[in-house]
Image (tube, rainbow, N blue to C red):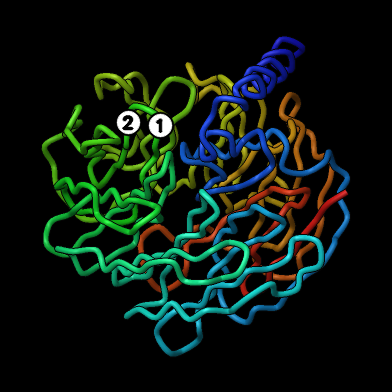
Amino acid sequence: MNRLRRAIAAAAAAVLVTVVVATPAEAADTTGVAVAYQINARHDGLSAAGVGAPPLTEKWRRDLGQAVSYPVIANNRAFVTVRTGDDYGTSLYAIDTRTGKDVWGPVALGGTYYWSALTLGAGRVYAINGDGRLTAFAVQTGRQLWQTDLPGQYSFSSAPTFRAGMVYTGGAGSGGTVYAVNAATGAVVWTAPVANGDNSSPAVTATGVYVSYACEQSYRFDPATGASVWVHSTGCSGGGGKTPVVAAGGLWVRESFDGSLPVLNLNTGAVKTRFGSWGMPAPAFSGRTGFFVVGGVLHAAAAATPDQPIWTFTGDGGQLRSAPIVVNGYVYVGSQSGRVYAVDPVTGTEVWSADTGAEIRPPDEQNVSTPLTGLAAGQGVLLVPASGRLVAYGR
């Protein structure tokens, strides 16, 4: 266990060294901001400096009425989208992380469905609705800077990802398409064809844009040109997709043709090992240690042997539903009961919990009936969407 604690500390220290050269998206795990689903462009759920060590206290709560998305956080602002109600569409909120009050907005995003999602970078927040209308707003003022209707598809359910001056997302309806959009102008820089195109928020690094769809059909594209680097295919077909995670030297794919999930080699797309089971939320990582929610239970495992738990944590009876995140050396996870937990990453021991007072729902990666939801941390607060409310905790 001491070896695991040292490894986690070393991984966090190694990440901190890169702050001076990292792009905003890559630095999200070290600078205390959250720029995409699961904190950063890799979607690995890691934030070395998002909030102080537990115990935390409740700072504020907002009742926003309907389902709340995952937050993105910067400039002491948290951005979420919220289902409008029975009418189609969602609204974008900009909320002061210190007070819980609106800074600007809300702004109606429109759309045929109830889905929308966000990413953040270069002083802008980027919102996409279910029709593929991608809009950039100034973080400070809420001024609309540009708006682009992504071409060629009519169904959009892939959360956008900002990295190095580009916004990446996917669309479906007639086959599938991955898009790269200039973050400053809204111009589409490249498109690439994929099977399906649903539900997979691109995981992006300096050298790859990764997406995954049904039957573990996965792709790596060049971030600048959209050129195909590799395709991992099993030969079966079907609809849908899931957000992959780049961590511990592999691509963690949550779609499968036989129930067990593949970890792919980042360079070749070959299967390295398998883990978990279909339907689990995205895992989080700190260095070579992964944190997985399977069947309502959180467990830690070495990346090389992901189905051999080091410890398990059941919370309040196996009701854990959120994707976990790792913040300042602690693992946070939400329960269907409404409780949020901080867990010691070495022992699996609960070190803090709080009751949001409402159900913490799992991320719905199959439908467009609600914004994609999840925990986030940054700027000194842990933000927990719980049904129609948003609750902030901090030191």
Q: Is residue 368 left or right of residue 299?
A: left
Front residue of 54 and 192? 192
Vertical comparison of 374 with 307: above or below: below
Q: Amino acid at mark 2?
A: Gly
Q: Is residue 376 left or right of residue 256?
A: right
Q: Residue 115 falls in which quadrant of the image?
A: bottom left
Front residue of 77 and 333? 77
Secondary structure of residue under mark 2 = loop
Q: Amino acid at mark 1?
A: Thr
Residue 55, image x, y percentages: 88, 45
Residue 375, image x, y percentages: 62, 53
Circle 2 sits on which residue?
208
Q: Is residue 203 left or right of residue 322?
A: left
C-alpha span from label 2 to label 1:
5 Å
Vertical comparison of 143 with 205: above or below: below
Residue contact at pointers 2 and 1, CB within 8 angstroms: yes
Q: Residue at x 64, y 17 (%)?
A: 14
Vertical comparison of 310 with 86: above or below: above
Q: Residue at x 59, y 58 (%)?
A: 71
Front residue of 337 and 200? 200
Residue 344, image x, y percentages: 77, 32
Q: Is residue 140 left or right of residue 113?
A: right
Vertical comparison of 257 with 178: above or below: above
Circle 1 sits on which residue?
205
Residue 326, image x, y percentages: 66, 37
CA neighbours of label 2 inside 10 A, class few (<14), some (14 to 19), many (20+): many
CA neighbours of label 1 inside 10 A, class few (<14), some (14 to 19), many (20+): some
Q: Residue at x 73, y 13 (%)?
A: 6
Q: Residue at x 51, y 40 (%)?
A: 25
Q: Quadrant of the N terminus?
A: top right
